[in-house]
Image: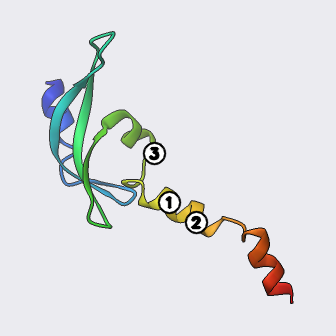
Amino acid sequence: NRRNHINDLKGQRFGKLLFMYRADDYIAPTTKAHRTQWHCRCDCGVEKDIDATVLKTGKVVSCGCHSAKLAHDNKPYPPYYAMELSM
């Protein structure tokens, strides 16, 4: 049974996300295609529903906090701040 196989993900971890339970399917407005969603809790405490396909392929590893941290850590100093550092 496909539904039982999908439920096997409960309690598993992908990146910073813990699968808590299967959420309602997302239904695309134009094509009416059903997408499996999982309710996940991130290590930072945020809970949200995420598409199962992107979770299993590794395209999503957090609620967004990981991407935000990477962007912040890799952000170059603003030009005025770099000038102050060189003085």
Write down the quadrant of residue 2 in the picture. Answer: top left
Alpha carbons under labels 3 and 1: distance apart: 17 Å
Q: What residue is disc 2 on? A: 72
Depth check: 69 or 76 in front? 76
Indicate the secondary structure of the residue bearing disc 3.
loop
Q: What residue is disc 1 on? A: 68
- Which amino acid lies under the numbered mark 1 shown in the image of this protein? Ala
What's the mark number on residue 58? 3
Q: Give the residue displayed 20% in from the left and 28% down from the top.
A: 25
Q: Give the residue displayed 86% in from the left and 86% down from the top.
A: 86
- Which amino acid lies under the numbered mark 2 shown in the image of this protein? His
Residue extending farthest front: 80
Write down the quadrant of residue 41 in the picture. Answer: bottom left
Q: Do the numbered discs 1 and 2 sit on residues whose CB atoms are within 8 Å? A: yes
Of the numbered discs 3 and 1, the one sitting upstream in the chain is: 3
Write down the quadrant of residue 72 in the picture. Answer: bottom right
Depth check: 53 or 30 in front? 30
Image position, residue 65 (x, y; %): 42, 60
Image position, residue 79 (x, y; %): 79, 69
Compared with 4, 15 (above or below) is: below
Alpha carbons under labels 1 and 2: distance apart: 6 Å
